[in-house]
Amino acid sequence: MIPASDRYWLRNAHIPQPLLDQSQPILAGSTQNLQFTNLEPSDFLQVDLKIDNGTITAIAPAGQVIDDSPSADLQNGIVFPCFVDLHTHLDKGHVWERAPNPDGTFNSAITTIQTDTRHWDADDLYRRMSFGLKCSYAYGSKAVRTHIDASGEQAAISLDVFKTLQAEWSERLLLQAASLVPLEYYLTPAGEQLADQIAAVGGILGGVAYMNDAIAQQVDRAFTLAKERNLALDFHADETDDPNSATLRVIAETAIRHQYQGRVVCGHCCSLAVQSDEIAATTIALVKQAGIGIVSLPMCNLYLQDRQVRRTPRWRGVTLLHELQQAGVPVAIASDNCRDPFHSFGDHDGLQVFSLSVKIAHLDRPYGTWCRSITTTPADLMGLPTVGRIGIGLPADLVLFKARRYSELLSRSQHNRTVLRAGKAIDTTLPDYAELDDVLTKT
């Protein structure tokens, strides 16, 4: 039970060491004073946290500070900062019952969602996007970036809904929008107009990159439009098992040529995993030089990639996470699509994303710094330096789990978690699916 007081201690917390912000001094010296537990060596620090008016004001080795302030004993429960979901599609979400994917393939997903867009008026988008945000907030997310399908007249409708939600949720969630169109769209006057619309909402210029004869020109134009408006870029790249798909390399080379390092995120990058070691290493070196961040979507790509009727898939669909991280490339994971033709499952839960990603991509033995992939790293890629980490002077936006070690955290759903925002426990009741019944019966 979290004390009702504005000033209290969280005692006996297990914090993953990589999530502790060491830019500020730790009470009683430094992290050298903090003892690693013997549950899983080097994974957790056992600490006491002091929260004062919504801010973390002290971090100390567990049991070393005597204070008469109220306290809650977490009994070695794990504490994460709130999650950061770098890559979602809120405008597509929660349409499964009215727009199911007939065979689970990528091509069918595109056809199905294109048909469903006839329903995407302001009310429909608002209802479904709100539902997704309610889930994200209840599970413990602090920041969300959503891609917005933005071709033609849909851009104005969807971006207006986004702006409304951004304002309504401003005290609870930090929301960013990235445009989503085929990259050739930016070679047209409509593409330049879209870049202006994205700049007007403080968004990110984005698009789907796929191999074609004009891919270099298309990527170059996207960079030019972004630079003219001082916009960050976020691409869908190489979401395929075709080893000849190399748009990530084209994007990296273009970023270097434009000297636009550190302003680009690329999602999916699946084909990197089916290319030769030599080709992949060359691309990864360029990605590192270009300062590109990579976001992998293991749940959605596991669902879509290598799917054929009555045939067992031969690969997992994820990019080279370990090789990218070892090269010093920032690597994040995110939820991507939820309950739509691209992924019939998902619930905007950062822990579920992390848990399944650990199992899909072997992000364990050792766990190392992978806990940052759903917290600190995506926060940095979104330009949010005070989010996704735990430290003195930072907001007490935390997720408290009863699980004491990774083997417990990743074996159960942790639906009994406590989410703190500014030190106060929030209502973690999830929205009822019935809220969307009338939306999903549209024909």
Image (cartoon, rainbow, N blue to C red):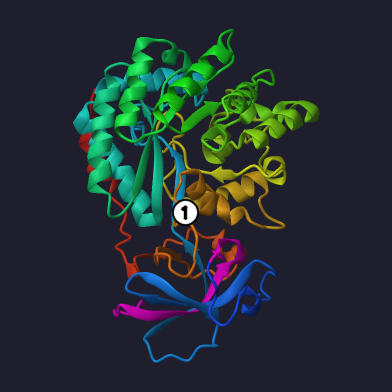
Q: Is residue 260 visible?
A: yes
The residue at 55%/82% (across/down) is: 62
User: In the rendered view, would you say 75 is above or below 180?
Assistant: below
The residue at 62%/28% (across/down) is: 256
Amino acid residing under circle 1? Pro
| Magenta run includes residue 12 | yes
| Magenta run includes residue 87 | no
User: In the rendered view, would you say 217 is above or below 227?
Assistant: above
Q: Would residue 116 be found to the left or right of residue 204 on screen? A: left
Which quadrant of the view contains residue 192?
top left
Residue 319: percent from left, percent from top:
64, 35
Q: Is residue 150 visible?
A: no
Closer-to-camera residue (102/118): 118
| Range drawn in magenta | 1-23
Residue 29: percent from left, percent from top:
59, 80
Q: Secondary structure at mark 1?
A: loop
Closer-to-camera residue (233/339): 233
User: From this viewpoint, which residue is outermost toward the right?
Assistant: 278
Q: Quadrant of the N terminus?
A: bottom left
Residue at label 1? 385
Which quadrant of the view contains residue 30?
bottom right
User: In the rendered view, would you say 232 is above or below 332?
Assistant: above
